[in-house]
Image (spheres, helix red, strand yellow):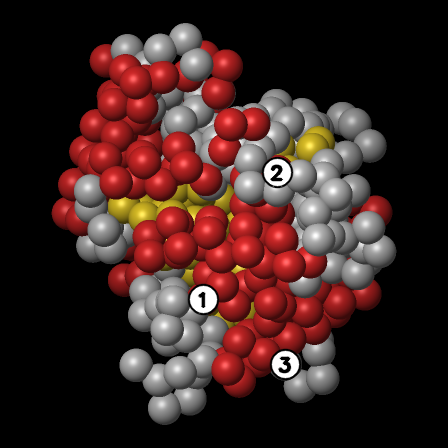
Amino acid sequence: MTVSWKLHNAMGPGLVGKEPGTDHPPISLERMLDLTRGAAAGTRRFDGVDLSLYAPHVDMDADDGAFQALVDALKSRGLVCGSVVAPVWGDLGGGSAMGDAEQRKRFLAAVEKSCRYASRLREAGVRPYGAVRIDSADNPTRWAESPRENSRRIADTFREAGRIADGCGEVLAAEGEICWAGMHSWRHMAELLEAIDRPGLVGFQADLAHTYLYMLGYNAPEHRLLNRDYSVDEFWEAYGAMTRALGPWTLDVHVAQSDGTVFGSGAHDKTGRHCRADDPRGKLNVAKCARYWLLDGDGVPRPAIKHICWDGCMISNEVLEAPATWDKILALMVEASDSTAAVAKRG
């Protein structure tokens, strides 16, 4: 059996941290699809994209004609859709997963709408795999006002969201990132998943850039695994500890580079900075780090993960608009996939 993962590009970098009327406006879905389709690494191409289900890229309330136009846009470029991002945040009509009854109701409504839309894409033949991505839609500062109660509320909300997803034939991947309440350290994230207790249905989305910040304890110093002057051996020991805790829950993987700093733009809270694939300040051996998430402790591929996705949010439009950027990204993803496949054991 050949081991491989489909290679996807996230459409989110065209949206996250972008503001209309500024020098970093949103990049249209059509342009992002064209840049993805145009990228090449030898004979390899991107297999698909991960979509963000909110304007200006996707209007889930639009008519059947708009839906078919999206399907046709993917098919005409030889791309499929994998994971999708649910608009669970308050400014997009959702609400805090640890909020009051009305806020949590809006959160769950956003999850349900996203799961139904994702299922439609599957039924249309353009979404063969992937998860629906969520987060707690609140921040660590408010969470810290009542940690135990707020974590309990998030777990209850995510558990109900999992029930909704299951009814639509979908799974949920909670994005591990230092800006999300109750998910802002590797230990809090693991404890939340254990409290939800829906393995295979409500799992983890590992992003290499964000989980690097987990190890540095940026928003949870008490859970720091690395000091700033760490050695190579200390890095991999810490990486192993983190992935032993979160790897078994992982349903979705974002390949990314990080320089170890944080950044925020637009309405997006400060979080781990994504770097260019060839950024000399990058701290990560991307291909080796990806291996820890894609393979279990015995070196066997995690069966739920069918694709890997590049995420480069909050990178300048000038860089994103350059075709060479995407060639370099694709080459790094090929390296991550092929090098991991070369050492993988068959289950």
Instruction: Specify the quadrant of the image occupied by residue 44.
Output: bottom right
Residue 87: give x, y in percent of width and height: 43, 33
Q: Which residue is mark 3?
A: 44
Disc nearest the viewer among 1 and 3 = 1
Q: Secondary structure at mark 1?
A: helix
2 and 1 marks in contact (CB < 8 Å) = no
Q: Which residue is mark 2?
A: 216
Disc nearest the viewer among 2 and 1 = 2
| Residue closest to the eye, 53 or 333 | 333
Q: How many marks?
A: 3
Q: Secondary structure at mark 2?
A: helix
First along the sequence among labels 2 and 1? 2
For the question of whether residue 56 can be seen, the reply is no
Decide: few, some or many residues near mark 2? Use Cα within 10 Å; few <14, some 14-19, many ≥20: some
Q: Residue at x 25, y 23 (%)?
A: 152
Q: Residue at x 78, y 42 (%)?
A: 316
Q: Which residue is mark 1?
A: 294
